[in-house]
Amino acid sequence: MNKTLKFLGSDAGFGRENNSAYIEIENKLILIDCGFTVFEKVIDNFNLNSYDDIEIIITHLHNDHAGSLSQIILYAYSICNKKVRVISGCEHIDEYLSFCGTPKDAYELVTETDNITMIKTEHTPYLDAYGFQMLINGKNIIYTGDTNTFNPFLPYINEADELYIDVSKSGGVHIKIEDIYEKLKQIKSNGTDIYLMHIDDKKYVADYINGEFELA
Ligand SMILES: [Zn+2]
Ligand SMILES: [Zn+2]
């Protein structure tokens, strides 16, 4: 399998490498979430000057998903003279960026684009969280973000070429691997490639799935 998204990290919230993915297409960089460990990876891995467009999708405002957002926007704006497009449904993202001292001029905030549709899900009672559908490179991708349920993604899954899904050993505010395993086998048999991400215990999950799915 040749997955469309590349990952800067796929750890759960208390891991060392925050879950974050990206795709480069033509002169555009699309970054998916940027937690507190991601700023360093961004400046090490990408020359932001080389892109015409920089888009950052933010699924929710937990620190392991948005902790580097203001820093990357400020860096792109003041060092590279680029305005980042932030794609997010999060209710408080403007306030969040304002509290961090991010100038309004430094970014554009949109809730969707031609090829990206946010899908509201449930993660914790303390904030609103979203996954999304992305149509890119001829692929239909579903990305759950952090979620405790798969239900909001069901209407989209039959058409999906790739599914990136949050799974865990411990469950709670995330989907427990045991609870979704049979459903994922069914989705896979329907022709969708499946990649597991944001994993709290990679050994446990790898042992449990026994090679059935790929870890992002
Ligand atoms: Zn997280
Ligand atoms: Zn979260």
Image: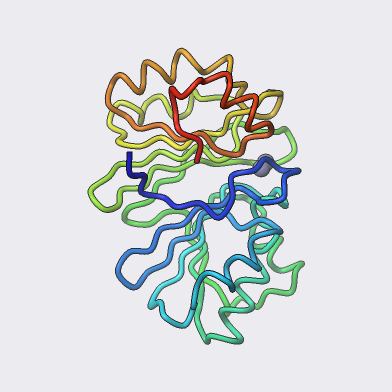
Q: Position of residue 75 (x, y in %)?
A: 62, 79
Q: Nearer the viewer, residue 173 or 185?
A: 185
* Residue 163 vertical position relative to residue 185 in the rendered view, above or below: below
Ligand 1 location (quadrant): top right
Q: Position of residue 151 (x, y in %)?
A: 49, 23
Q: Position of residue 157 (x, y in %)?
A: 35, 28
Q: Position of residue 200 (x, y in %)?
A: 68, 34
Left or right of 95? Residue 209 is: left
Here the colouring is rainbow
Residue 154: quadrant of the picture: top left
Quadrant where the N terminus lies?
top left
* Residue 166 vertical position relative to residue 55 in the rendered view, above or below: above
Residue 214: quadrant of the picture: top left
Taking the spot 68% from the left edge, 31% from the top edge, the residue there is 201
Taking the spot 57% from the left edge, 82% from the top edge, the residue there is 77
Q: Outermost residue toward the left? A: 138
Q: Nearer the viewer, residue 117 or 137?
A: 137
Taking the spot 46% from the left edge, 24% from the top edge, the residue there is 211
Left or right of 43? Residue 111 is: left
* Residue 193 vertical position relative to residue 64 in the rendered view, above or below: above
* Residue 7 vertical position relative to residue 146 in the rendered view, above or below: below
Taking the spot 46% from the left edge, 12% from the top edge, the residue there is 182
